Image: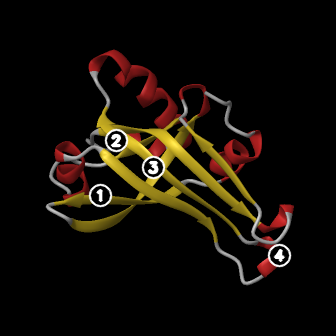
């Protein structure tokens, strides 16, 4: 497996909201989630309750896709990441570490009762016009 290009990780670290896509019975759905990046484990940690639509769908089909984007009107600055991954609730074995990562990014989340999830990346594609028009960096597990 090839290592992930540092420019991809730099982009993920710079942001904190992703768009998540799930499916159930062939019907797609999307949601926006705050996330904290865990580069060491090639994943993001996000928070959502089990009773949300995307939470229920991820429990039934944990293969998810999504994106992270920089909003800009300047064509030369366009950057966006598309990803695929496996989304699962954090287990007792990893909950302490995941919670530490998430709370470091979002300390106010200590006040909430919620479920922490991980999305382990299986595919990453960063489009970065700063590197040249339409330049793409791709990583696949």
The quadrant where residue 59 appears: top left
Label 1 neighbour load within 10 Å: few <14, some 14-19, many 20+: many
For marks 2 and 4, give the CA distance.
33 Å
* Secondary structure of residue under mark 2: strand
Sequence-wise, the earlier of marks 3 and 1 is 1
Question: Between marks 2 and 1, how big is the CA–CA gap?
Answer: 10 Å
Q: Is residue 123 left or right of residue 133?
A: left
- Label 3 neighbour load within 10 Å: few <14, some 14-19, many 20+: many
Q: Which residue is mark 4?
A: 76
Residue at 53%, 35% in the rendered image: 141
Q: Residue at x 48, y 40 (%)?
A: 122
Q: Earlier in the sequence, mark 2 or mark 1?
A: 1
Q: Which of the two residues, 53 or 106, is positioned nearer the viewer here?
A: 53
Instruction: Tell me the number on the disc at residue 87.
Output: 2
From the image, tell me which residue sits under label 1. Answer: 22
Q: Which residue is mark 3?
A: 84
State whether residue 91 is above or below residue 83. Answer: above
Q: Are marks 2 and 3 in contact (CB under 8 Å)?
A: no
């Amino acid at each position: 497996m090839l290592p992930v290009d540092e420019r991809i990780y730099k982009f993920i670290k710079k942001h904190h909201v992703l768009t998540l896509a799930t499916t159930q019975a062939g019907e797609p759905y999307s949601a926006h989630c705050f996330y904290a990046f865990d580069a060491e484990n090639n994943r993001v940690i996000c928070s959502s309750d089990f009773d949300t639509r995307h939470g229920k769908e991820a429990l039934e089909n944990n293969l998810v896709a999504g994106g992270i984007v920089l909003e800009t009107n300047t064509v030369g600055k366009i950057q966006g990441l598309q990803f695929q991954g496996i989304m699962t609730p954090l287990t007792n074995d990893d909950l302490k570490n995941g919670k530490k990562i998430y709370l470091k990014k979002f300390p106010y989340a200590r006040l909430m009762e919620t479920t922490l999830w991980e999305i382990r990346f299986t595919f990453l594609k960063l489009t970065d016009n700063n590197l040249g028009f339409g330049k793409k960096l791709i990583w696949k597990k």
